Amino acid sequence: MGRIGLLVSDLVLSFMWIWAGVLVNILVHGVLGFTRNDPTGDIVRYFFSVISMFVFAFLQKLTKGGLYNPLTALASGVSSGFSSFIFTIVVRIPVEVTGSILGVKHIIHTFPEIGKGPKLNVAIHHGALTEGILTFFIVLLSLGLARKIPGSFFMKTWIGSLAKLSLHVLGSDLTGGCMNPAVVMGWAYARGEHITKEHLLVYWLGPVKATLLAVWFFNVVFKPLTEDQEKPKAKSE
């Protein structure tokens, strides 16, 4: 897929990802009638969230690289060379943020009563550390899955989905457990809080630094694949 097609995919997937989270909540709490304090409702919501992640993993495969998370794009860009890194920073990430903002605007227009997105419930540095740690582990896991289980779409998606869900639950009461700056940016932009120190430090600086650290750590600990190792992986995928 050319770069223009990749950007279109990023924009659409970012827009859809925002809507997916809202629709899961509407289904669980509105249609099925579970209260927000009902543990059964949480289990049902987690179930639909995993299904949603499977759908988006398939869409990413279908679009041959479309992304909705700037941190995933950053990790990929850093690992793919200087030109890819610049393209990611200057073009892909802004497109993904734009898709999220458009998604939030459309949601608010359609459902004015919808909540205002994730909120920081701890001190700034505590929040930045939380989002950073969560991001570090999910990026590290994603890099490992891409190498250790080549070709197994279901297994990689299943492990990645459960890991993301677990880390989200761990950080949900503190920062929202987002691990996706574009999502937070969409809601923060709607509230007019996208340029606050809290938003920039917790949801951008912390996760971005953690992503770069995870990529560096992975490349130091695990040797790059040789050409002979890459060939079987390419054939299986």
Image (cartoon, rainbow, N blue to C red):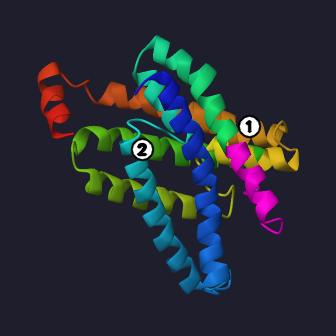
In front of the other: label 1 or label 2?
2
Q: In this view, does 30 lie above or below 191?
A: below
Q: Position of residue 16 (x, y in %)?
A: 58, 52
Q: Tell me if residue 9 is in the magenta stretch.
A: no
Based on the displayed image, in which of its 4 quarters is residue 218 positioned? Answer: top left
Tell me whether the residue at label 1 lies in contact with that at label 2, contact meaning CB atoms closer than 8 angstroms.
Answer: no
Task: Report the quarter where the C terminus lies.
Answer: top left
Comparing 9 with 36, the one in front is: 9
Label 1 – label 2 distance at C-alpha = 29 Å
Counting residues from the start of the chain, the first of labels 1 and 2 encountered is 2
Q: Residue at x 54, y 49 (%)?
A: 134
Based on the displayed image, in which of its 4 quarters is residue 97 positioned? Answer: top right
Task: Report the quarter where the N terminus lies.
Answer: top left
- Element marked by disc 1: helix
- Element marked by disc 2: helix
Asked if residue 212 shows in the view, the reply is: no
Q: Count up the numbered dots.
A: 2
Q: Position of residue 179 (x, y in %)?
A: 58, 47
Q: Tell me if residue 118 is in the magenta stretch.
A: yes
Indicate left or right for 132 with 3 as reference: right
Q: Position of residue 8 (x, y in %)?
A: 55, 34
Asked if residue 127 shows in the view, the reply is: yes
Q: What residue type is labelled 1?
A: Leu
Residue 201 image label: 1
Q: Mark 2 points at which residue?
A: 60
Q: What residue type is labelled 2?
A: Gln
Q: Which residue is drawn at 40% across and 58% down?
A: 54
Which span of residues is magenta-colored? 100-121
Q: In this view, does 98 lie above or below 41?
A: above
* Classed neighbour count for the residue bearing mark 1: other residues with Cα under 10 Å, few (<14), some (14–19), many (≥20): some
* Classed neighbour count for the residue bearing mark 2: other residues with Cα under 10 Å, few (<14), some (14–19), many (≥20): some
